Amino acid sequence: MSEPNATASDRASPKDLPSVDRLLRDPAVQLLVAEHGHTCVAREVRALADELRARALRGELAQGEVTPPALADAVQRRVAGRMAPRMRAVLNLTGTVIHTNLGRALLADGALRHLLAMMAGPNNLEYDLDSGGRGDRDTIVEELLTTITGAEAATVVNNNAAAVLLTIAALARGREVIVSRGELVEIGGAFRMPDVMASAGAQMVEVGTTNRTHPHDYERAINERTALLMKVHTSNYAVQGFTSAVSEADLCAIAHARGLPVATDLGSGALVDLAQWGLPHEPMPQEMLAAGCDVVSFSGDKLLGGPQAGLIVGSREAVGRIRKFPMKRALRMSKLPLAALEATLMLYLRPERLTDDLPTLRMLTRPQDEVRRQAQALLPAVAAAVAPRYQVTAIDMMGQIGSGSLPVERLRSAGLAVAPVSSRGVGRALDELATALRRLPVPVIGRVSEDRLLLDLRCLARDEDLMGQMPALQAALA
Ligand SMILES: *Cc1c(COP(=O)(O)O)cnc(C)c1O
């Protein structure tokens, strides 16, 4: 690469550089052309030639860089870099199981197989195999969703933000939607309830206060312009202390007495009761429907453990209006996640096997003792790789479910804590370690806490994925 120390005699000048054509005729470069074709390799050869010429003019190019093997090598590196995908697999050792920045839920094997099989050729996405006529893509998952949740009808869109937007637009465009001040959520990525209402063309009417909202707050706000009463699950924060909220059942009684519908944005939403595995209970769409809600929406890639999707379940009347609303066409789900969603929902037909079948649940329900044993087993190899500058201990740590689910509850977990041995320059030493981990072939993402880098092992399914990279980590830190 750049050799700032080159002496005058071993510095290369622009005339030492071969032409683009000659470089392309180099036998090693011809091998690259055979593999990738002329267009791709020629683009990199030209870019390399430009770069080398500029450096030669600045007197920064060494003779050693313009030998045929060195040039062929440089072309090879550029082509490899260009052909390396920007989206890469990483190891999520952050302790947050459903991590939005790391792609949220992992798909089950069954979902991956179905996805692959359906995408490789034509399928009956919108084709009715009984009649031979046009079908509706919603039918692929509607029966599964109604069976699992007990809803009369169901439809799906691109994500839950779209589901909320579409629900409000279809049911309340040009009219008023009543929502509690305690539920005006902002979730990551600029999804704020007041903005969503405005985008949907509805007038938001806030009632109650941040900590307390009562039935009469809703009752007093209802007028002839009201179209919808809305509940929003406060998924990423908790209002604690002197608080009061109106339950879905009470709100439905108020709304239905006046002929108005109630919609609930559940955010994550769990299709099974997490309490059966000792996890905190997360509100379920089934419960919202039983309470009388006309529409319930939730995400496909949070606790459900499937692909990105927005699921809408509810009454035939309300879901029918949502499905027919023109905006639905713009927000519809693609066939890729739809195939994955169908296969994921099918796993819910055999709930006893879910903690084996569904990676998200498998990771969430791993006993702390098992993660502790894993930490003990991995400790020696990791300690050897980061020695002598860092020391490693196996400790208990607290993780979290993530993606806005159950923000207050923590997951008892375990893992490795890596700390710099020297007490000087701790921040820089931790940065260096975190950077080295992120630059591994399969980047390892941990988290820094109290002068240590923590690697939570709850989500490490195969020890080998970490162990196999320890030689590379050792080399990077040397
Ligand atoms: C996550 C969440 C959403 C958005 O869901 P996406 O599937 O990410 O679009 C909306 N509302 C609440 C309360 C959420 O927690």
Image (cartoon, grey):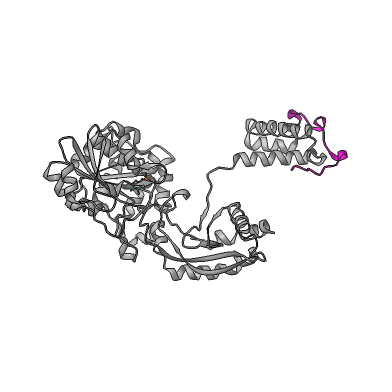
In this picture, residue 456 sits left or right of residue 282: right
> Residue visible at 85% across and 42% down?
7
Q: Nearer the viewer, residue 430 or 372?
A: 430
Report if residue 129 is visible in the image. Answer: no
Coordinates of residue 246 in the picture (x, y in percent): 21, 52
In this picture, residue 102 sits left or right of residue 143: right
Q: Residue furthest right?
A: 9
Q: Nearer the viewer, residue 465 or 113?
A: 465
Question: Which picture quadrant has residue 241?
Answer: bottom left
> Residue visible at 31% across and 32% down?
327
Magenta segment boundaries in residue numbering: 1-22
Q: Nearer the viewer, residue 304 or 218?
A: 218
In this picture, residue 6 sits left or right of residue 359: right
Q: Nearer the viewer, residue 372 or 184?
A: 184
Coordinates of residue 130 in the picture (x, y in percent): 26, 38
Q: Is residue 143 above or below residue 238?
A: above
| Count of marks, rendered view | 0
Q: Is residue 19 magenta?
A: yes
Q: Is residue 51 above or below residue 186?
A: above
Q: Which quadrant is home to the N terminus?
A: top right
Question: Which picture quadrant has residue 470?
Answer: bottom right
Q: Which quadrant is home to the C terminus?
A: bottom right
Coordinates of residue 170 in the picture (x, y in percent): 25, 35
Coordinates of residue 289 in the picture (x, y in percent): 21, 50
Report if residue 234 is visible in the image. Answer: yes
Q: Is residue 65 magenta?
A: no
